Amino acid sequence: MTPTSLRSRLLSRLVPAMLVLLLAGAVAAYWVAWRSATKAYDRALFDTALAVAEQVQEVDGQPELRLTGQALAVLLVDKFDRVFFAVRGDRGELLHGDAELPLPAPPAPRVVIDEGRFYFDAVVAGEPVRVAALERQIAGRRLTVLAAETLVKRNALVREILLGMLLPELLLAAVTVAVVWFGVSAGLRSLADVRSELAGRSHDDLRPLAVPVPEEILPVVTEINALFRRLSEALESQRNFVSDAAHQLRTPIAALRAQIEAAARESPPAARDRFAGILAGAERLSRLVAQLLALARAEPQATAAEPEVALPDVAAEVAEAWLPAAIARRIDLGFELVPAGVHGNQVLLYEMLANLLDNAIRHAPEGGTVTVSCGMQGDRAWLTVEDDGTGIPADELAKVFERFYQRPGSPAGGCGLGLAIVSAVARRHGGTVSAGRSPRLGGALIRVELPGVRTLAAERAAGRPASG
């Protein structure tokens, strides 16, 4: 289902209602305009009929129109409309005037204003006209005096009145839509503030939202804060469980190793190979516990502002610990370090790089090469570890960061948590990690990108040269 905006929903309900109101207003305005125009011009038209009727007199017992041609022209002249008149007898016969100007047909209703006076609509010479009729008794005969005019003035007045009434309504409708648009935008600004607050947070920031919102949105924010609290409690419980379990396992595992080593020393030489296998398994178990503890520490959690850490310093510290392992396998462990810094936890960053080096040294061939590099690119600090091993197949590049995943044919001694710890530490620091193929060594390349600190990188610029 495609989501729709609140603004669209409000306008979709408001606009049809406004259109109905505008249509009703247009009908009412047209009726008012037509009625006003009809009344105004019907009075003037009746005056014409009355003026003609005043000139009908009895001559020798017959009605006769005593109106000169010049007077008739003045009476019937109009700037916009054509004017017609006729005088008809009691049987409808034409006595004077335009033969095309008829009496109303018998079924046609007549608008009677008072006795002997009425109005109706007709057609003369193919044009619609309005007719004013006046009935008079002259020379013992009932005569009907008709005056008619076309509808040019009336239609123009109707249009003027209609526009005069509709334009303000249209303007009011436009203003209403604009007010609703900007009013909804202003009302939704609180939601935009909430969205900005959430978008600006890292994935591990579960602090309650403190954005002021209207009363209608407050329940939503309250529920979000309650969800954050529950998530924080669940994550904290999970971290505590893993951390406590790892701590509790350390002591019995250390005691187990000591007992195995003591038993191996006291056993005959033929049995020492078996104890060596048991001891190797205990060491793998010890490493697994240590990595579980490191993974628990690296899980997202709300922390205060962390100090600035120089990545070259972390690399130098890790190198001291892993150089013996590299020498034991005759691996050329090199460093290409450019000043770069991040805000972070130095212990976790050390653990991240240690796992990268452990992974690279184990997968590089004996006598191979492992290179650690770091630097700044824009506002991002980066750290890479690459080797000249067999590399990672393209279909496994994403899987290697999953917990407990081990590629088929991986060297013994791993437990599938090293790169998962790297990924967790990177996420904890607001960064990303990716795997690929090293363009210069041909093996695997793991790249970590973190939000950088330029000030720290600048301060270190005069310090450490690249080493290898």
Image (cartoon, helix red, strand yellow):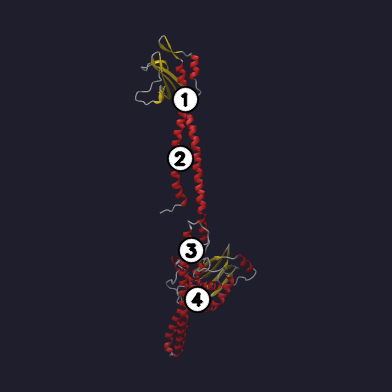
Q: Give neighbour class at mark 2: few <14, some 14-19, many 20+ (Cα, 10 Å).
A: some
In terms of sequence position, does the residue under pointer 1 or pointer 3 come before the other?
1
Return the x and y of residue 296 as percentages of the image width and height: 48, 73
Task: In this rendered view, identify the residue nearer to me: 9 or 336.
Answer: 9
Return the x and y of residue 315 as percentages of the image width and height: 57, 72
Q: Give neighbour class at mark 3: few <14, some 14-19, many 20+ (Cα, 10 Å).
A: some
Write down the residue under mark 4: 366
- Above or below, 275 against 126 in this view is below
In terms of sequence position, does the residue under pointer 1 or pointer 4 come before the other?
1
In terms of sequence position, does the residue under pointer 4 or pointer 3 come before the other?
3
Task: In this rendered view, identify the residue nearer to me: 71 or 315.
Answer: 71
Q: Kindly report which numbered mark, 1 or 3, lies closer to the viewer in this rendering.
A: 1
Write down the residue under mark 2: 22
Q: Amino acid at mark 4?
A: Glu
Q: Residue furthest left?
A: 107
Return the x and y of residue 110 as percentages of the image width and height: 38, 25
* Mark 3, secondary structure of its residue: helix
- Distance, label 1 to label 4, CA atoms, is 116 Å
Whether label 2 touches label 1, CB < 8 Å: no
Write down the residue under mark 3: 225
Write down the residue under mark 1: 43
Whether label 1 touches label 4, CB < 8 Å: no
Return the x and y of residue 113 as percentages of the image width and height: 42, 25
Give the mark count.
4
Q: Is residue 403 visible?
A: yes
Q: Kindly report which numbered mark, 4 or 2, lies closer to the viewer in this rendering.
A: 2
Quarter holding the C terminus is: bottom right
- Above or below, 21 against 196 in this view is above
